[in-house]
Amino acid sequence: MTPRRLSGVSVLATDLDGTLLRSDGSISDKTRAAIATAHDRGVRTLFVTGRPPRWMAPVVAATGRSGISVCANGAVTVDLSTDTVLTSAAIPATVLGEAMATIGDLLDGSFYFAAEQALPGPIAATGLFPEPGFVPPDRPVAQVADQPLYEIPGVVKLLVRTEGATEQTAELAGLVATALGGTLNVTHASRTHQMLEISRAGVDKATALANLAADWSLPPAQIAAAGDMPNDIPMIRWAGHGAAVASAHADVVAAADEVIPDPEQDGVADLLQRLLP
């Protein structure tokens, strides 16, 4: 069956890793051309990613597109054309400290924290502050936290990495979310590590997308969204049309209106072509 055309959509909000980008971080010529053609015909491609701002330069190089993007699971908006963080929803220091204590009491075995910092201003000033052990010893890091993470200003995401199996990450996320009692938002996106991504309460990809849509005077019906992991579920449900790639997490597939091919088969490119007026 030929997928139906989708009329009246002017923005495609797409996740990056595992959705738009292939496993090696690249995109095909077909997808790059589809993004350019859509832009020329009035359909904007908006990057909405869990990536921190400092990981966006390769995306600009690969896609040839810059402008406004959403990073850190909705906690940050950036202007990639000026390498600037525009808005930053930081976790309050007291909340962060209490959450770290709660998680420490809850988890058994080895676990490690890291803080992603992003204050408004140059993207070059953002950074990751990992505690010792968070980053594997064979991977160098620019800096290691030498102070309590809750004392670092502008923490937009608390990362919690454990030694558990990735198949059990959803269960762990549920336990941590329950323990935190709604004080923070807990999600996960890694296919290779058991790692939680924790943001300020009320912050996710959907809220960031809704805020931009309001600025642009666009209703959800004029926005489509594509993703592959649980951190994409809020925006897939919020958008007028939600798509999951074929290899997406089962919960994402269940939340989506349709399943599109993986990035290796140019699923986002095909979806864009169906959005063109």
Image (cartoon, rainbow, N blue to C red):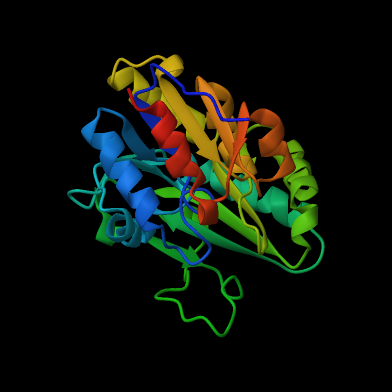
Q: Position of residue 251 (x, y in %)?
A: 72, 37
Task: Identify the image quadrant of residue 176.
Answer: top right
Answer left or right for 217 relative to 182. Answer: left
- The residue positioned 72% from the left and 57% from the top of the image is 104
Camera-nearest residue between 208 and 152: 208
Q: Position of residue 138 (x, y in %)?
A: 56, 85
Up-down: is 3 above or below 101?
above
Camera-nearest residue between 152 and 88: 88
- The residue positioned 35% from the left and 56% from the top of the image is 29
Camera-nearest residue between 158 and 252: 252
Q: Residue furthest front?
A: 1
Up-down: is 227 above or below 189?
above
Asked whether residue 268 appears in the rendered view, the answer is yes
- The residue positioned 47% from the left and 69% from the top of the image is 145
The quarter of the rendered structure image containing the C terminus is top left
Up-down: is 272 above or below 247?
above
Tally of marks: 0
Q: Position of residue 195 (x, y in %)?
A: 65, 57
Asked whether residue 204 appears in the rendered view, the answer is no
Q: Position of residue 264 (x, y in %)?
A: 53, 56
Answer left or right for 239 relative to 126. Answer: right
The quarter of the rendered structure image containing the N terminus is top right
Q: Residue furthest bottom?
A: 138
Task: Identify the image quadrant of residue 223.
Answer: top left
Camera-nearest residue between 267 and 178: 267
